[in-house]
């Protein structure tokens, strides 16, 4: 595990994989009398800041929940604004990719996205695949249940074709069928905005994750807040069902 110096001068071990439910954009905007879309724009800025910070402190994986399979219930205007912000971010990311060396991957079914956004996602994934900075996994049209169903269907199809044996399926083989294949499970899952639920995020992968909840709304989330979450994580006793 990498070490970084916190402002309090206590070195903290940085978890290898942190996942964040980027929630609270709408409430942040409403509090200011702004449209919800302004909250998403502010949230996108916070994402840029936090991703850079994660890279600087030597985190290996950062997984962010950007748009869920349930978020299609929102208004067309709001969805279009979120997709537009994603496009903007990916265009920028492509421009500075060679310098940043951040690897970007996507978790989720990208087929319902606009052809332009999909093409950008594919381009960013391909160009950055060998970069060694932090790996940022963007969950886009992602749902934990949908991910598990897809994996189950894929394995069932292999069995039906005679290419796999139902009894041979174990946890490792199942994990390899998920969007997160070959990526270690998250150590720490952070949810800002005061909501105390997972909202369908990383259901399989979160089996032994440590949770950190804060009332701070995502656009107000700062590197110092991430430091607090990491400090809390370092104070936890992870037993994985055993005894320590
Ligand atoms: C999270 O912020 C962004 C997405 C879900 C796309 P919200 O838009 O859910 O913000 P609140 O929860 O309404 O404040
Ligand atoms: C979870 O937040 C999804 C994202 C942050 C992308 P939501 O705002 O959609 O979750 P609920 O509706 O409060 O459970
Ligand atoms: Mg929300």
Image (spheres, helix red, strand yellow):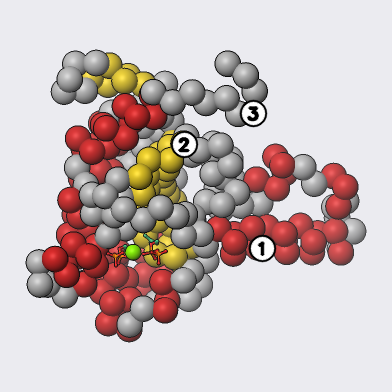
Q: Which residue is mark 3?
A: 241
Q: Position of residue 87 (x, y in %)?
A: 29, 66
Residue 46 relative to residue 174: left or right: left
Residue 109 relative to residue 90: left or right: right
Residue, x 48% and y 76% (percent of image)? 112
149 over 1 or under it: above or below: below
Alpha carbon distance from label 3 to label 2:
13 Å
Residue, x 54% and y 44% (percent of image)? 206
Direction bottom: furthest residue: 76
Q: Earlier in the sequence, mark 2 or mark 1?
A: 1
Residue 177 visible at all: yes
Q: Evaluate if marks 3 and 2 touch, with contact meaning CB atoms under 8 Å apart.
A: no
Q: Evaluate if marks 2 and 1 touch, with contact meaning CB atoms under 8 Å apart.
A: no
Q: Earlier in the sequence, mark 3 or mark 1?
A: 1
Task: Determine the secondary structure under disc 2.
Answer: strand
Q: Which residue is mark 2?
A: 210
Q: Which residue is mark 1?
A: 149
Quadrant housing the N terminus: top left
Q: Position of residue 17 (x, y in %)?
A: 44, 36
């Amino acid at each position: 595990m990498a070490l970084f110096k916190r402002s309090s001068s206590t070195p903290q071990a940085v978890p290898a994989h942190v996942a964040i439910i980027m929630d609270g954009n709408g409430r942040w905007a409403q509090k200011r009398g702004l449209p919800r879309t302004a909250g998403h724009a502010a949230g996108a800025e916070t994402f840029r800041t936090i991703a850079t910070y994660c890279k600087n402190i030597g985190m290996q994986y950062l997984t962010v929940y950007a748009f869920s399979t349930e978020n299609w219930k929102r208004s067309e205007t709001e969805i279009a604004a979120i997709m537009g912000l994603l496009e903007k971010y990916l265009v920028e990311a492509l421009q500075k990719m060679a310098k940043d060396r951040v690897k970007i991957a996507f978790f989720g079914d990208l087929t319902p996205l606009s052809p332009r956004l999909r093409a950008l996602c594919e381009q960013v994934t391909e160009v950055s695949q060998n970069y060694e900075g932090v790996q940022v996994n963007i969950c886009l049209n992602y749902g934990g249940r949908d991910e598990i169903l897809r994996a189950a269907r894929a394995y069932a199809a292999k069995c039906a074709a005679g290419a796999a044996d139902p009894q041979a399926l174990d946890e490792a083989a199942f994990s390899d069928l998920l969007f997160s294949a070959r990526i270690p499970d998250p150590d720490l899952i952070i949810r800002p905005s005061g909501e105390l639920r997972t909202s369908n995020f990383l259901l399989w992968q979160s089996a032994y994750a440590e949770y950190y909840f804060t009332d701070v709304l995502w656009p107000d989330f700062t590197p110092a807040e991430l430091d607090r979450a990491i400090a809390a994580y370092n104070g936890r006793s992870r037993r994985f069902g055993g005894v320590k």
